[in-house]
Image (cartoon, grey):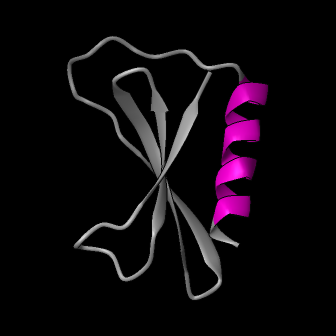
Amino acid sequence: MIELTVASLPDRDRVVVELWRGAVQLAEVSKEDGTYRVEFYVEQGTNSLALELEELEEALGRARDSLG
């Protein structure tokens, strides 16, 4: 399951929602000027991480709802 964490970061004007799978941060969802943005975190040289599309869509929907 993808876990969500609402975070207030020093380099952001507004809160963000972080998407985690275990100890690995997958992405960060933010809302600036009415636009939602998803920033994916990928480490070079690591193995890929496979996610079910429905699971990712559901987590992104919950993140959007958390940001209002």
Q: Position of residue 7 (x, y in %)?
A: 40, 59
Magenta stretch, overall SS: helix
Q: Position of residue 57 (x, y in %)?
A: 74, 39
State which region is magenta: 53-66
Quadrant of the rendered image containing residue 43: top left
Q: 60 and 9: which one is in front? A: 9
Quadrant of the rendered image containing residue 36: bottom right
Q: Residue at x 55, y 15 (%)?
A: 50
In this view, the residue farthest toward the top is: 47
The quarter of the rendered structure image containing the N terminus is top right
Q: Is 21 rendered above or below residue 30? A: above
- In the displayed structure, does residue 56 sit left or right of residue 24? right
Q: 23 and 57: which one is in front? A: 23
Q: Residue at x 45, y 70 (%)?
A: 15
Q: Is 42 rendered above or below residue 46? A: below
Say whether residue 38 is magenta. no
